[in-house]
Image (tube, helix red, strand yellow):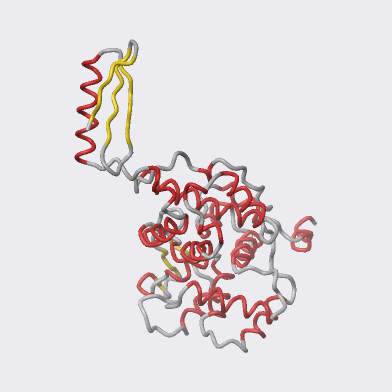
Amino acid sequence: MATIRKRQDKWQVQVRRTGSQSFSKSFTRKSDAQIWARRMEANADTCNFGPDPASLYKITFGDLMQRYLEEVTPRKKGGAIEAIVVRALQRHKIASLCLAELTPERLSKYRDERLETVQGSTVVRQFVIFQHILKIAKVEWNIPLPNNPAAMIQKPPQNRPRKRRLNPGDYESLLNASRQSKAWHIWPLIDLAIETGMRRGELLKATWDDLDLQGRKLTLRDTKNGDDRTIPLTRKAVEVLAVLPRTSERIFPVTPVAVRQAWERLRNRAGLRDLNFHDLRHEAISRFFEMGLSVPEVALISGHKDYRMLARYTHLRADDVVGKLD
């Protein structure tokens, strides 16, 4: 119900609903106060004002993570990978904090603790998720958060972009290690990543219907930048794809987790613990430039809309360039 009181030269309105927040505002004229009160009461009848701020002591950050995991993550590109990250965050003690305790100071402490064991870029990615969870909670779930504490703290500097490429002998080491792997998919994925520059997620989403072996083309649907992309295939890529079993709609009917685990086991056996799967994309794009492809041609394959993003991929080896100087 609405209460209107005269306070000195102002009319103060307070609108309250049982189990909800109260709202108040002051007006010079009583008629304006009455109009605002009626409008706020009507809003309260049609859409709940939300839980009382006291509920911030009853809801944990982990509760928000779980709801986010169930309602938001499945709708996102890369949701499978994000789900892995969110589940890992749920196991951290910060998930047990009630929302009233989730202050910038607590999050700053979390940031500093994490930086002792992981890189700055990892912490930044986690805080991107934190910020989105809290934004969704406030805007869409009507949780009475006074602010977004994750947006208020200073983020650590991100690491310089990786420039790791395959060194002489790395490919052979991976090949030898793959012979001990029971994961049939891992070596074809490695070869295709090097031959096409496709991201791991793109490789796992690719379907047989979008593959044209005769025309040496593979169309990727709804890629990272939101567009479809048709990739021209090298002869080796065609050879790899031609012998794969067609047991599913997808070319690689495996999960991101299975690929990550198989890759980590393989690279460790090969003695290449510093090599990430995404480094294979860097290797591929660098090779495209070494072949003499232009920036627009490489962008057609890689999917980069901003040509400036390709600058870090053009770290050509001096031995490959010296012959062109004569």
- Position of 239 compared to 13: left or right? right
Residue 134 visible (yes or no): yes
* Quarter holding residue 28: top left
Q: Residue furthest top?
A: 9
Camera-nearest residue between 52 and 154: 52
* Residue 265 horizontal/vertical position (percent): 62, 80
User: What residue do we see at 23% from left, 38% from top?
Assistant: 44
User: What residue do we see at 45% from left, 51% from top?
Assistant: 133
User: What residue do we see at 50% from left, 66% from top?
Assistant: 84
Camera-nearest residue between 245 and 162: 162
Q: Quadrant of the C terminus?
A: bottom right
* Residue 60 horizontal/vertical position (percent): 45, 55
Residue 223 visible (yes or no): no
- Position of 110 compared to 144: left or right? right
* Residue 196 horizontal/vertical position (percent): 54, 67
Q: Is residue 70 above or below residue 48?
A: below
User: What residue do we see at 48% from left, 70% from top?
Assistant: 203
Q: Is residue 65 above or below residue 11?
A: below
* Residue 138 horizontal/vertical position (percent): 39, 44
Camera-nearest residue between 271 and 58: 58
Q: Quadrant of the N terminus?
A: top left
Q: Is residue 14 above or below residue 77?
A: above
Camera-nearest residue between 88 and 234: 88
Q: Is residue 274 above or below residue 3?
A: below
